[in-house]
Amino acid sequence: MPPKQKSQPPPPGISLGETATRFLATISTESRNKAQGEVFKFVRWYGEERHIDTLTGPEVANYSEQYYISTTTSTDNLSFVKKFLAYAQKQGFVPSNLAAHIRIKKLSSKGVAGGSARAEEPVLLTGGGYTDLVDRLVLLKSERPKIAEEIRKAAADKDFRENAPLEAAREKLGHLEGQIRELEDTLKRAKVAEVAQESSLKASIGDIVTLEDKSTGDKVKLTLVGAREANVKQGKISIVSPMGQAMFNKEVGDAVNVNAPSGVISYSILDITRG
């Protein structure tokens, strides 16, 4: 018997999108249909092209926190993200157990019963964020005819039992429709935040805040946004995150203290620019 071939090590710096595709290919079709929406939602949050080994525990914990603030579906869905991150560690794509930073909470009976009312809660957005979502929705809808054509061509092969292209096209369409529904729901509930008056010196949603780390002297610019627009890679911080709450309503010269895994980090506000 020939020796068993050893699997090749994963490529360095594998992207979130590629990791998600590999993970979904390892689970059953039934589980995949349930998991792909939540997994790709997590992937889109940080960007499909971002290397998964650059993710940090605090970022994952922040996503978990934002999930419970904005979700209108069962919190059990977050377990799919936890399994995805556990898979990434098992495959050696990440150096640490990022799955440990996903906290699965159980909704109270009051929370479950109030699900329909919760679905109507407004989603706070900046003006620019609202426009970006509208543009994104138009782009996604324009993809429908292309995928429909892929399904039509793949379906021309009458052997449906092993028609991988047909299954792939259908999964792509399901993923696309999930994104469209999510965006339509967000825009339906969107509330565009009012821009603070120029005379106001306090940090508010849409503002660009320049901070200086008191211990290192490093400077960073962060934009305060609603939870739906948060993007750590782009320096967009949700006003409901620990960092956002510490910055919100502060003035130039004020101290901003943030609890981090390594301890309290202290900043000083150098400038506030209206977005």
Image (cartoon, helix red, strand yellow):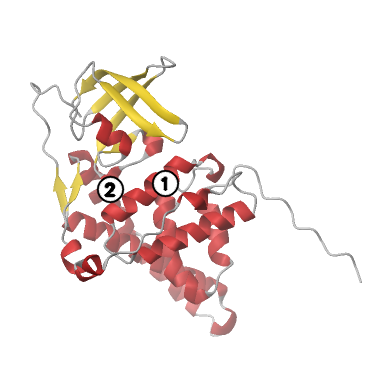
Circle number at residue 140: none
Classify mark 2: helix, strand or loop. helix
Classify mark 1: helix, strand or loop. helix
> Which amino acid lies under the numbered mark 1 shown in the image of this protein?
Ala
Does residue 118 appear left or right of residue 267 in this picture? left
Does residue 245 appear left or right of residue 146 in this picture? left
Q: Position of residue 8 (x, y in %)?
A: 74, 54
Q: Which residue is mark 2?
A: 228
54 relative to 20, above or below? above
Quadrant location of the C terminus in the rendered image = top left
Who's the residue at 19% across and 21% down the image? 251
Determine the image quadrant of residue 104: bottom left
Answer whether labels 1 and 2 touch (C-beta < 8 Å).
no
Does residue 269 appear left or right of residue 50 in this picture? left
Who's the residue at 89% across and 64% down the image? 3
State how far apart marks 1 and 2 are (Cα): 16 Å
Q: Which residue is mark 1?
A: 61
- Is residue 136 visible in the rendered image? The answer is yes
Q: Position of residue 42 (x, y in %)?
A: 41, 53
